[in-house]
Image (cartoon, coloured by chain):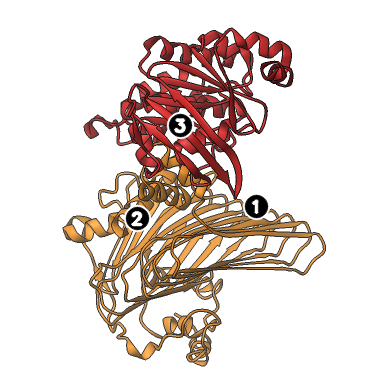
Amino acid sequence: MPSGNTKKRARSAREKTAPYGDDINLEEYEYSTSHPSDLESLDNISKQDRTLVREVGFDPSQKRVSGSFMQFDNESILADVLIQQEGLEVMPTDLALKKYEWLHDYLWNAVQVDTDKYTARSELENYSGYFIRATAGSRIEMPVQSCLLMKKNQSVQNVHNIIIAEEGSELHIITGCATPANVEKSLHLGISEFYVKKKARLTFTMVHRWSEKIDVRPRSATIVEENGTFISSYAILSPLKSIQTFPKVRLVGPGAKTDLYSVVYGSKSSKYDVGGLLSLEAPKSNGKVISRSIATDECEIIARGDLIGLSGETRGRLECDGLLVSNTAVIRAVPMLAARAEGSELSHEATVGKVGAEQLSYLMSRGLNEDEATSLIIRGFVKLKVPDLPPALQKSIDDAIKMSMEGGM
Amino acid sequence: MNTDFLLETKDLRVEVSGIPILSGVDLTFSAGQVYAILGPNASGKSTLAKAIMGLPEYKISGGDILFNGKSILHKSITERARMGIAYAFQTPPRIPGVKLDDFICRVCPDYQCKDEDEMLMGDSCACKQILYDDFERLGIRNLANRELNDGFSGGESKRSELFQVLSMRPKIMFLDEPDSGLDYDSLKIVGRELKAIREKRDATLVIISHHRYVLEFLEVDKIYILQRGRLVYTGDMSDIPILEEKGYERFFAEIAG
């Protein structure tokens, strides 16, 4: 169980505002008072929910996955590992913490509990979420899929996820978060802690699809050890009230590597503040933060990237591309580079512009009208191209983005 | 109104960024014929084709463009394309995230998925096989899965452009230096494709080129020579070897004399 010290730190940060994003009054929401119940089977979910989860890449038929996790609000949970998947564990976090005493060392280790009021509050209220682990040397080729659904009004979905890829393992996770369009004002608090051990390889793909009155404050961090690889791809393609997220990856072992990709398709009057921080702490560690933003309607997108070179022989790269397709939207790219060790090579490139006139003319000369041409350019632009991803996984991402775009546009 | 011509330009004046490029050009193009537009660098050959396609940077400052006897000045690029006017870009822009094969299936009627049920394993449509066979013929099978114009070599671009323009089945197509940057084998492939169109006589070909090979191979019906934004000479195939021998400067001097 969490030590008294953790609770104490959490209480001390109760009022600590986050440096970025609109401040949210956490007293305006209802918190869950009970622990979630078990959902017997994926067959029991409604047709509507099936459609919704498909839009964030979750396949209820579980055809091409190794395991599934699904959570409705804080109410009910399904955790399922398909047979023959040795070395894979998928279970609710609270259960896992009861089962494994050692897991408490991983709780609030990558993410600090007193980071801000959101981490603090998450600790102080009831939470669930998933624990996913690949044991040492296990290569789980099919992805684990997870989906967090939020359907209640005026409430908070509070999850704490812990993902561990043990030494030499390979693990792929596709996770989606979604709300039906009619949900009124609610808040999603998500803590995610990732641990990539020596020579392990973890890919994490997340697709978000929220509705217009939802605020979202994920807090996540990853620790990558020697020669470990962490690849994260994130897509948010729906409107929402606001999201502010700034995941942090610490490369603590020599040769550790990470790539963070994100795509934001902004619409309506949503506010997106999405970033990524790389902390290069060991020699020969390297990483990239690559973001694509498309701003339509009156939305506001801030794309942040922060590279911190704490060791020599390190390389970090930041790429931020923005496409503005509205006169009332705004994209702000905020790159930050801080080298604190000789031999740390950090670079960045940021471009923000509108759809190219030449590209438009070209596509129109092939018979597309202006809207079709613009939409083709945008669809091409949002494609997340993640090198070295298994083709099946890349296809799942493409499909999820396609579904989500069609659902939202 | 004379509707014998498929397309004509009348006293066509075109500006780019306020600088006049074409200063009153009268040309006619008949259905099923093959034309070459020749002229020294910066004479306005490409500008003519781009203005006819309707590219926005090419501002019409005077004159008219008629298609089947009707002005198309107020028509968008899309409308012109759908009427049957096509232009093969010399340096087509890169379209990230859009694969060549998907794009062609989207824009070219011949390769569209006719039946969604034909989808095999949910991955690929049967029509792709036909497309790939045709790609093979033009030697661009390797480009199928590449992003549109992304890192295509000069020769690859030419063949990909030609492929797209041909599969749109236009009534008139402007090919901007379809032979430049091609090695000898590719030149033969391109020549063969163009020859096939010529023989069918169901489309008008307008070729902008500096090179004798393709023009002679195709046996062009008519040549137009532009100089400093004006039409200075109208001739036929027999002029091409003379031009090559003398060069534009002497050729112009002699016709002026």
The numbered disc on residue A376 is none
Colour chain B is painted in? red
Residue A45 seen anywhere in this rendered image of the structure: no
Q: Chain of mark 1?
A: A
Residue B84 seen anywhere in this rendered image of the structure: yes
Q: Residues within 10 Å of mark 1 (few under 14, many from 20)?
A: many
- Quickly name the residue at label 1: A227
Question: Do the residues at pointers 3 and 1 share their chain?
Answer: no
**Which is more foreground, mark 1 or mark 2?**
2
Q: The residue under label 3 is which amino acid type? A: Thr
Percent coordinates x, y for residue A269 in the rendering: 38, 73
- Quickly name the residue at label 2: A405
Which chain, by letter, is orange? A
- Quickly name the residue at label 3: B9
Q: The residue under label 2 is which amino acid type? A: Met
* Residue B231 in which image quadrant: top right
**Which is more foreground, mark 3 or mark 1?**
3
Count every numbered label the image shows and give the total: 3
Disc 1 to disc 2, C-alpha distance? 36 Å
Q: Closest to the observer: B95 or A55? A: B95
- Name the secondary structure under disc 3: strand
Q: The residue under label 1 is which amino acid type? A: Asn
